[in-house]
Structure formats: C-alpha cells, structure tokens
C-alpha cells in the first residue's frame, strides 16, 4: 500500500526509528511502490541520436503508463475502499471525523520528514540500490498525488456512504481521478527531469555534502563518491576535435575501457576509479559540461565514460543506471602533463 493513511505512516516510523537501517527492507520498494517505480522519470526517458536526454514520444509514454496501471489500480482501489469504509463508520462528526481528516492530511508531511531523515541515515551502499537518490522524493510525489485524489465529505456525504450505490459511485470516481493524477504527475516529473531542473530535496543536498571527498594526496583506502554517469565518444556526430583525435586534457591517449573525464577539483587527475558494474577506469580527461555538472542539474559530480563509437556509448547510457556509487583512489605521485603518453601513464 502507499503512504497515505496514519497507520501506514506510524508503521514506517517504527521501522525507520528502530535502530540501524536495514537495506533489505527499504520502504520505497514494497509491492505497490515497485509498480509505481515503473513510471518514474528514469523509465520515461531515453537518449536521442545526439546523446541528449529526452522524454519518450507521447504514444510510447502513454503505453508505458497504461501498462503500469494493472499493477497500481488494485492497491488504489483497496486503499480507497478502506478509507470510505472508515468514514462510513464515523458517527460523531464533531470530533472523530475531524481527527480522521487531520490524520489523512498530516500523513504526507509526516512521511516526507521520515523519508528525509531516513535517507540521511542510510549507508551509501544502501543508496546504490536505489539507482538514483531522487527516487525516494519522486515516489513520494507520486504517492502525494494519490492521496490528494481522495475527495472531501460533508457530514451528510459521509452518512450517504451507507447507500451501496453512492458508495460505489464515490469509489469509482475516486479511483478514476487518482489514476489520472498519477499519470499526470509522472509526465510532469519526466518533463522536469529532461529539463534538468534542480530537485529541492534536503536529503539530496545533505547526501551531496557527505559525498564531497577529503583528499590528502596519500589515500590508500580511497573514498566513496556518489556520481552522475554520462558518456562521450570519438567517432560520430556530437563529438569534439580532441575526443576525435583520442586526445585527453592530461595528454594521455583516450582508450575505451580505460579513460573517463572528471572534474579534477573533485577527483584528482590519474585517480583509479572502481565502478561496481564496469570495473576500473582512470581519470585522464575533463570537459566543460563535466565541471559544470550539467547532467545532474548542478548537484552530483559527473564522470563521463569514454567510448570509441557513438552507438556503443548511447547503448551503454540507455541500459545502465545514471547515478551510481564509485570508489576513487587518488594517485600516489603528483600529476604532470604527458603529451601522447599511454592511457594510464603515471596513474594510481
């Protein structure tokens, strides 16, 4: 079920405040939210032939939304029926109804704070299972659109719920309104994601601060970093003259399977970078969009993975997580420029 009723919020509070976080029971990925996750922005976008992120065309987007509904509607229906039944049984409208409505209206704000506090406390290893630490916020937004679809009732309206015909009419209308709101919210978030607008999420900002490395120049243990991963290439439209010539900003030759571009103010040049899915790469290049953090809307640091062919780069970008945790091992010796040298010359 989704996070709207007071008892669900209380249950979440008990789980989240029960001690150390448990990565195998993240509330975001219960059976209902796993279906909602199918219509998050990461599944509603793709990269075009120029490597630019864009929303799916309207037909494909609508098809994806419609296809996800069979897994979502049953939970919406059961939640709606439970709410209507709880209202139907209220007799003292002066106090009990007010309490019920107050619980329903406050549950989202309670949940927001709980999720923010929880996301600040969980480990970076747990965060990596989320693919993107905006996911909690985005799922919360979808759940809020669901809860906001529940209609308000007058005392007479609540009494009328005892009529089966009126009960079913309200149930059907609420479900239809909720489904419409969910689809509309998913589309809106996708448009925001494509336009790279900043996410106003205090947990996101907190995590970014925590991920800023403290580099001493002699760090055998390395440091963990949560990054936005992008791609660039040598051959194909959208490249630049240096990349096409396999020339990096450190003088090292660019090589697929080895080279990545970084912001050297965050990841020192020639650092060894361990990815959980593609193994080891070396920080030998940089770029304006990488330093500006364009792809993450100014939030997470960027690592731009080098490919020879554009089609291979785009295939990789469309089939792997955009956000990922990496381990960075700075070089043990001071960096120096080395023209036309091997891809890993002087690296850690």
Image: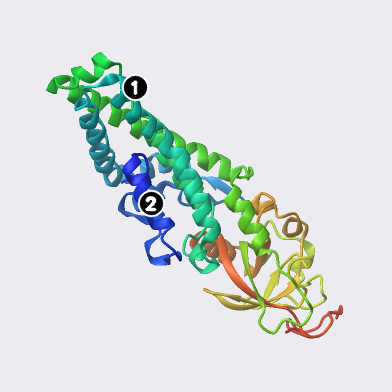
Question: Of helix, strand and loop, which one carries label 2?
Answer: helix
Residue 136, placed above or below residue 225: above
Q: Is the residue under label 2 in contact with that under label 1 (CB below 8 Å)?
A: no
Q: Categorize mark 2 by other alpha carbons within 10 Å: few (<14), some (14-19), many (20+).
A: some
Asked if residue 54 lies left or right of residue 106, the reply is right
Disc 1 designates what residue? 152
Relative height, residue 145 to residue 241 (above, below):
above
Which residue is more in the foreground, 297 or 113?
A: 113
Report the coloring of the rendering. rainbow
The tag on residue 207 is none
Question: Residue 240 at x, y = what percent?
Answer: 76, 61
Spot the residue most to the left: 164
Location of mark 2 (residue): 12
Whole-angstrom CA distance, mark 1 to mark 2, is 25 Å
Label 1 crowd bin: few (<14), some (14–19), many (20+), radius 10 Å: few
Q: Position of residue 19 (x, y in %)?
A: 44, 64
**Residue at x 41%, y 60% (from the top left corner):** 18
**Residue at left 76%, top 70%?**
285
Q: Quadrant of residue 270?
A: bottom right
Mark nearest the camera among 1 and 2 is 2
Left or right placement of residue 186 versus residue 48 in this view: left
- Horizontal placement of 28 versus 304: left or right? left
Q: Secondary structure at mark 1?
A: loop
* Quarter of the view holding residue 178: top left
x, y percentage for residue 317?
55, 61
- In depth, the one of 162 and 226 nearer the eye is 162
Q: Nearer the viewer, residue 339 or 68?
A: 68
Give x and y (percent) for residue 194. Answer: 58, 44
User: Is residue 236 visible from the viewing direction of this image?
Assistant: no
């Amino acid at each position: 079920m989704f996070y709207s009723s007071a008892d669900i919020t209380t249950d979440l509070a008990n789980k989240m405040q029960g001690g150390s976080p448990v990565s195998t029971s993240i509330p975001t990925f219960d059976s209902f939210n796993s279906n909602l996750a199918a219509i998050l922005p990461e599944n509603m976008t793709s990269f075009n032939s120029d490597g630019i992120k864009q929303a799916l065309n309207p037909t494909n987007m609508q098809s994806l939304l419609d296809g996800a509904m069979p897994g979502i509607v049953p939970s919406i229906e059961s939640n709606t029926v439970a709410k209507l039944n709880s209202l139907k049984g209220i007799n003292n409208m002066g106090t009990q109804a007010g309490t019920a409505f107050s619980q329903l209206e406050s549950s989202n704000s309670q949940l927001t704070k709980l999720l923010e506090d929880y996301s600040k406390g969980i480990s970076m290893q747990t965060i990596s299972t989320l693919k993107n630490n905006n996911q909690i916020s985005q799922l919360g937004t979808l759940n809020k659109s669901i809860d906001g679809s529940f209609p308000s009732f007058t005392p007479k309206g609540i009494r009328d719920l005892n009529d089966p015909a009126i009960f079913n009419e309200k149930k059907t209308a609420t479900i239809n309104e909720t489904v419409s709101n969910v689809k509309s919210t998913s589309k809106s978030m996708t448009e925001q994601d494509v336009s790279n607008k900043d996410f106003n999420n205090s947990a996101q900002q907190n995590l970014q601060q925590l991920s800023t490395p403290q580099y001493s120049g002699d760090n055998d243990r390395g440091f963990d970093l949560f990054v936005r991963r992008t791609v660039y290439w040598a051959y194909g439209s959208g490249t630049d003259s240096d990349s096409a010539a396999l020339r990096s900003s450190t003088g090292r030759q660019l090589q697929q399977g080895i080279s990545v571009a970084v912001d050297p103010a965050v990841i020192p040049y020639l650092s060894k970078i361990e990815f959980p899915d593609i193994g080891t790469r070396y920080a030998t290049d940089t770029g304006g969009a990488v330093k500006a953090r364009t792809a993450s809307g100014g939030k997470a640091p960027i690592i731009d993975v080098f490919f020879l062919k554009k089609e291979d780069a785009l295939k990789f970008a469309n089939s792997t997580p955009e956000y990922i945790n990496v381990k960075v091992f700075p070089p043990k010796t001071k960096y120096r420029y080395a023209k036309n040298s091997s891809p890993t010359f002087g690296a850690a």
